[in-house]
Image: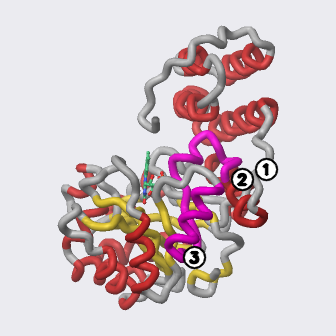
Amino acid sequence: MKIGNLNIPGRVFCAPMAGISTRPYRIFARRFGAAVVYTEMISSHGLAYNDKKTKDLVNFGDDERPIGVQLFGADPEIMHRAARIVSERKPDIIDLNFGCPVKKVVRKNGGAAVLKDLGLTRELVSATVAAGDVPVTVKLRSGWDETSKIFAEAGTACEEAGASAITLHARTRAGQFAGRACWEDIKHLKETVSIPVIGNGDIRSGEDAARMMDMTGCDAVMIGRAAMGNPWIFREVNAYLGTGVNPPPPSLDDKIAVMMEHARMLLDAFGETRAMFKMRHHVAWYAKGWPGVANVRRRAFAMTTIAELETLLDDYRRGRIDLSDNHVNTVDE
Ligand SMILES: Cc1cc2nc3c(=O)[nH]c(=O)nc-3n(C[C@H](O)[C@H](O)[C@H](O)COP(=O)(O)O)c2cc1C
């Protein structure tokens, strides 16, 4: 498939996730077969007003390509300025976030709130397209709530304004992450627009991806939560889509090697204290499903140095951790 003039090397995309889609996460996603990765959503306002921390979020390496930089905001003029700044870094895609349900964002009419005003939706896309020659894509939710599912009209508006592809997370803003994503919406969108449609919502396996593609006719699928701590899912889904067979899962040693590499990359980027703070969550995700996971998490959330992580993983490998305690409560369960 193509997005604008860009050839996309596969059909399984890695979703943008705020606080998660940092460089190490994206590197592993690409290494294990994600066709495209994205930065987390970045404030157009912060970029246009030269905020240093916001600007740092745009940093990426050539080893991550193809990469989309995702922007959010509700002011076309500011979006234009932000897109010009981003274009100078030559990402492969600029993606606009019209799906974020978080109060802090929708209160200022950004994210999913853009879907309440199709005129604004159109203007934001046009302003971004006019900023340079990087293909512009959009990521939508199905609508604001069940009574205002306007993904089809929004999709048409985006296409007319020059968008090169649309990702649909098939839930409304009101639906947040509850219930099942409504894949029929993806099918309907695919029948409505002629640019590529990327289907998103609740893919956890190769079987899910194949089912979504069969049911909706979407051009590609995007995986979010199921890739947290599991970059191997891209390899698995690619293999399943290609052959109908799931490859063997990664071994414990493979996982531990990736965890340590992930921690080292965070260390280089953020210094030990911040890196290990960030790494705590990743360890919890990587260890999901391990016997004794509760004890692994408990120790991970107390660690402050990379040496402690190494010892923790070594203890786990050698069976020096009580494997009977598996009780955990997490947001993604
Ligand atoms: C913690 C978290 C952060 C997210 N941040 C973003 C974001 O920055 N931009 C965006 O477009 N979507 C964001 N999303 C939504 C995901 O990209 C994706 O649309 C959603 O999780 C549904 O896909 P899934 O069922 O495969 O997880 C986020 C989701 C989660 C769970």
Circle nearer the N terminus (1, 3) = 3
**Any mark on residue 81, and which?**
none
Residue 269 appears left or right of 107: right
Check residue 270 for magenta coloring.
Answer: no
Check residue 226 for magenta coloring.
Answer: yes
Picture residue at 73% right of the left edge, 17% below the top = 316
Quarter of the picture containing the N terminus is bottom right
Other-residue count near label 3 (Cα within 10 Å), few / some / many at <14 / 14–19 / ≥20: some
Q: Which residues are magenta?
A: 206-233
Q: CA distance from mark 1 to mark 2?
A: 6 Å
Q: CA distance from mark 3 to mark 2?
A: 18 Å
Picture residue at 73% right of the left edge, 55% below the top = 235
Q: Is residue 122 above or below residue 67?
A: below
Q: Which residue is mark 2?
A: 236
Counting from the top left corner in percent of width and height, residue 137 is at: 47, 76
Picture residue at 52% right of the left edge, 81% below the top = 196
Quarter of the image where one finds residue 38: bottom right
Please state which amino acid type lies under the numbered disc 3: Asp
Q: Secondary structure at mark 3?
A: loop
Q: Is residue 115 above or below residue 119?
A: above
Picture residue at 68% right of the left edge, 41% below the top = 265
Nearer-the-camera pick, 194 or 129: 194
Q: Which residue is mark 3?
A: 219
Circle nearer the N terminus (3, 2) = 3
Query: Is residue 49 at least partly visible in the picture?
Result: no
Q: Secondary structure at mark 1?
A: loop
For the residues bearing labels 1 and 3, Cβ distance under 8 angstroms: no
Q: Which residue is mark 1?
A: 247
